[in-house]
Image: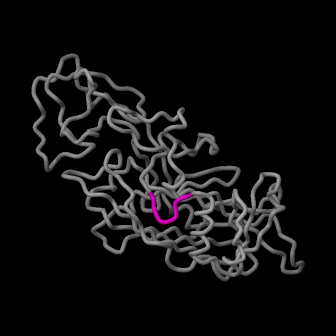
Amino acid sequence: MLTFSLAILFNISLAAIVCGTFAWYTYATRTGLEKQYHGTTVGDMGSLQAGLVSDVRLDEFLVYDLAEDDHTLADEGKYVYWCKERIEARTINYVLHENGYGTTQMFPVTSGAFDYMSDDFDSFSLYRNPTYLVNYDKEDSEFTASKEDYVHLNFVFRFEDVDNIGDYLPGYNVFLSNCKVETANPEHELYKSVRLFYRNGYESCIINPTAEESGSNDVGGILDLNADGFYDYDEDNLYEVIYGETETFEYNPEKTENDGDLGWAELDTFNANHKRGVVAINESTIKPKTVVYSDLEKFTSKAKAITFTDPAYHNLGRFDMFLYFEGWDRHVVNKEQGHGFNLDLAFAVQM
């Protein structure tokens, strides 16, 4: 089995707020990361070769030790840039930048409700946050997240026939042998909100690299987005509003008699008081929609390949990867400002 690795360091800074939990909905701002990715990436690949797919032609590909392939994916209007022996961090940064994706910054976004086991993988998209009294609408392109807010790396793999140089063999499985996400300081848990979505032309998966088992995140509920200590209610002061995506919810039959009694130390965007005189949503009736994710073990155990060199696709293995912070994950909190995470990816091919 051949192995090689990809290491990326992010160091995201989050803006401080007056009090309570840092929640992505209102308070998240991009205040700068490290100027570049650190460390080296894919190296010593042997007969397994990795390329980066670009939607645009890269004028300086030679400067970054890339070999341009402008014919293999010409029918898709894309270019493949094959990597020579090692893919350096600056090369990944360059390809991301030229394609308009996040390079030195990431901002919490959300996939909304998505089930990779049943939903069409081409329908996967990332959306920006709701704002005070304005929910995001997945059908409105205005709410699609900016490409600069997340990382999108489109890998392809090929396996060269050692007896016929220049010929590439089909049917080789490529595995994700490691996807380690961690922080240098165990007190900070921003890295636990990291998600990796991939698709390979046949299937897709959202992976939570830090989860011990598969699970899901709720993507709907009541929130306090103006930080007044109360769940948001409409401009007429009559009814609470709900954000994100929900299956069902019900209002209480009567107006709230008294303000809730949560103190400021207990308040955050997700935990707030109901306002006196406003008809509250009965929290026990809220059934939010969810986004499901897989744990990492079934991939790193080699039980499941992430792609294969496909005879129906130029003998290439596709690994179209999105890396992002899931905004509904509650690990994006105020104490995480100025902290980041390390990501180490490793792939392997079964011989």
306 in relation to 203, above or below: below
Up-down: is 125 above or below 65?
above
Chain part drawn in magenta: 101-106
Residue at position x 44%, y 36% in the image: 136
Residue 60 in the image: state x and y as whole percent. Answer: 69, 72
User: On the rendered structure, is 167 left or right of 108?
Assistant: right
Residue 228: where, in percent of width, then height? 19, 39
Magenta segment's dominant SS is loop
The residue nearer to you, when weighing 78 against 311, is: 78
Residue 165 percent location from the top left of the image: 87, 78
Direction right: furthest residue = 164
Q: Residue at x 34, y 26 (%)?
A: 249
Q: Is residue 69 visible?
A: yes
Which residue is painted at 71% across and 64% down in the image? 156
Is any part of residue 350 visible from this angle? Answer: no
- Magenta stretch encompasses residue 251: no
In which quadrant will I find the N terminus?
bottom right
Residue drawn 43% across the image and 47% down it:
216
Q: Most extreme residue toward the top, as rendered? A: 253
In the rendered image of this protein, does residue 299 appear above or below residue 2? above
Quarter holding the C terminus is bottom right
Q: Nearer the viewer, residue 176 or 137?
A: 137
